[in-house]
Each structure stands twice: as structure tokens, then as C-alpha cells.
Image (tube, grey):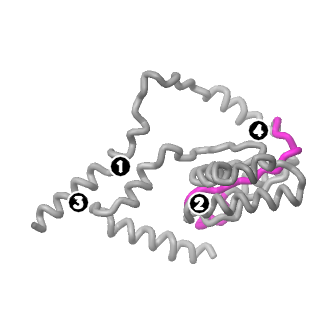
Amino acid sequence: MLLSMLAERTRKSIRGSADDIGWLQRDPFMPPVTDGTQRFTEILNNIRFGVHKLPNSLVYLLIPGLGSNHVPLYFVNTQTHLSNLGLSCYIAKIHSEASVEKNAREVKQQVEEIYNRSGKRVMLLGHSKGGLDAAAALSMYWFDLRDKVAGLVLAQSPYGGTPVASDIARQGQIGDIFLRAMAFLVCNIIKVSFS
């Protein structure tokens, strides 16, 4: 009995998120992927040298990703750089580990505050889970935000889900105890040391 339970937990651990990554499958009816690396590098080099085409008629709201509450300077360099380019920029005040729905509400409220204060439309720039939070805000509150938001830019947002998060959330794996210990360490001990 004990041996079969251990064998099942081991099987689940080894299998990991294999059942969750079907969204990666190739579909012959989808358009081909194009490599935008060259254009990305060109734009990145222009930004590094202060050449940009970002309009100052917008306000930029940076929406941070998972774990950002534990990294005090998350997005600060980005905000400083955009400000040095003469752009109005804010970092969204969200709790990165909160649900997408809760953070979507927070993003909505902050967009409305910025818009009402500045009279300028807001460009949402979401990183990782922050991109999902921003996209959810637009989806859930479209009628409230459609005239206030100029656009949505996502960087490294896991639109198809993330096997890592699935593995962490999945119960019954060998690593459950280790994962709970790591979560406690990150959320309680490391957070305190940054305070």
C-alpha cells in the first residue's frame, strides 16, 4: 500500500506538467511564426541610445509580475529610464501573488485615477503575470477602460499558462513538502529581510 502510494507520487512528479502543455502543439493550419529578433534588436539599440518614438501624450503604467513584491526595486530602473526620456510613468501598486481577478480590479482603479488626474490615455506595460493582470483588466472592465487605455504591451506573459506554476500548484507530487517550505521561505523570511 505505502509502496504503491509512493510510486504514484513519483510518477506524478516525473510527469510534471506534461499534461498541461498541449497549447504548445503544432497546428498545420496556423500561420508560420516569424523571427522578429532583428527588428527587436534594432528597437532595443535605439532605446539604449535614447532614440525612441514613444509619445509623451500618454502615461505609461508598468504592471509587475509574480514575486515582484519581494524585489523592492522591480521596475524602478525601467521607470527611471522612461522618465529620463520625458515620459510620465508609474508602477502599478498590486500584490503580485494575488489572483488575476483582484489585480485586474487594482489595475482598473489605477488606470482611472491616472486618467482622471492627467487627462491622458494610459499605455499598459505588463511583465510576466502582470501582463495577464493587465489583459484581464481590459477584458473584465472593457466598457470602463476603452477610452482611457491606449494599448497593452506584454513582455514574457504566460498566455498559455506556465508549467512551472502548474507543477507548484499540483498536489500529490514528491516535491510538495519542499515546495511548501520554499513558499514559506520566500513569502515570510525573505520578504522580512527586504522590509
Identify the residue shown where x is 49% and y is 69%.
186
Indicate the secondary structure of the residue bearing disc 4: helix
Residue drawn at the location 67% of the way across and 49% of the way down? 138
Q: Give the residue at the far front of this rendering.
A: 143
The residue tagged with tag 3: helix, strand or loop?
helix
Q: In the rendering, at what x and y percent does residue 6 appear?
A: 17, 63
- Residue labelled with disc 2: 101
Q: Foreground mark, 4 or 3?
A: 3
SS under mark 2: helix
67 magenta-colored: yes
Work out how far the residue at label 2 is from the one at label 4, CA to CA, in angstroms. Answer: 33 Å
Q: In this rendering, would 55 be left or right of 108?
A: right
The answer to whether residue 84 shows anywhere in this view is no
Give the residue pinned by disc 4. Answer: 47
**Front disc: 2 or 4:** 2
Q: Residue 1, relative to residue 165: is it above or below?
A: below
- Closer to the camera: disc 1 or disc 4? 1
Task: Give the main secondary structure, helix, strand or loop, of the magenta stretch.
Answer: loop
What range of the chain is rendered magenta? 53-74
Residue in the picture at 33% in, 45% down:
19
N-terminal of the pair, mark 1 or mark 4, is 1
Q: Earlier in the sequence, mark 2 or mark 4?
A: 4
Q: Quadrant of residue 21?
A: top left
Q: Position of residue 30 (x, y in %)?
A: 49, 25
- In percent of width and height, residue 159 lies at 53, 44
Amino acid beneath label 4 = Ile
